[in-house]
Image (tube, helix red, strand yellow):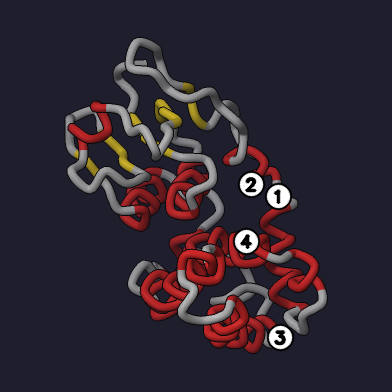
Amino acid sequence: MTDLPILYSFRRCPYAMRARMAIAASGVPVELREVLLKDKPPALLKASAKATVPVLVLANGNVIDESLDVMQWALEQSDPQHWLKDAAFDSEWIEECDNGFKHWLDRYKYADRHSEHPKTFYRANAEVFLAKIEDTLTRLTWLTGDSAGVVDVALFPFIRQFASVDSVWWHGTPYRQTRRWLEAWLDSALFATVMTKYPRWESSSAGEIFPPMPVPI
């Protein structure tokens, strides 16, 4: 296992989730080390001063510690689902998600920590991005065309997080096509694979082989 790339991950982190999705889709095996973000292991801190997940340590010692870069690395090894068809890692969709929507999502999710505004204020600001997604998905099956691509994979973990803050409210919204799109991901075999629960990695133990088996295309 020591010859495999090592992926430090946290199951519920949307950045780590998008990275695991790409790795699972590629079928390229890695040693997955599930960490606790409140008690980060020294090996993670040594690998990346950012101390965030995901962090991928390649067999040659090179470190990739940005989620989009991990996705690109995995899909450049193997891309059986053709997610790289639009090569859209610099997409405005991803830019707005990571640098705009995520800001409001965090405040909506943790509104008790941001009491200067009510929770609905943060949600309404986040909905500006949701409205753009909904408008696009009324015309397209996926955000960049007739098949899923990098943009869809990169965004859906954050939309999932938004939807889970208040699921009753979410299912009553007019975002029907966005719910359809999100549910397609959540019901997929690929998502089930990346959300497998693993024990917390300890420095004295080996990680897990990920993906544990080939994922159906």
Determine which residue is flagged by label 2: 191
Q: Residue at x 36, y 53 (%)?
A: 67
Tell me where residue 204 appears, x and y as whole percent. Answer: 34, 10
Determine which residue is flagged by label 3: 138
Quadrant of the frame with the N terminus: top left
Query: Dot 4 lies on which element?
Result: helix
Choose the circle earlier in sequence order: 2 or 3: 3
Q: CA distance from mark 4 to mark 2?
A: 12 Å
Q: CA distance from mark 3 to mark 1?
A: 21 Å
Tell me where residue 112 appears, x and y as whole percent. Answer: 53, 65
18 to the left or right of 156: left
Q: CA distance from mark 4 to mark 1?
A: 14 Å
Q: CA distance from mark 2 to mark 3?
A: 24 Å
Work out whether 131 lies above or below 37: below
Tell me where residue 146 appears, x and y as whole percent. Answer: 64, 73
Report the amino acid beneath label 3.
Answer: Thr
Query: Dot 2 lies on which element?
Result: helix
10 to the left or right of 56: right
Tell me where residue 41 appears, x and y as whole percent. Answer: 31, 28
Image disc number at residue 160:
4
> Which quadrant holds residue 42?
top left
Choose the circle earlier in sequence order: 4 or 1: 4
Q: CA distance from mark 3 to mark 4?
A: 19 Å
Q: CA distance from mark 2 to mark 1?
A: 5 Å
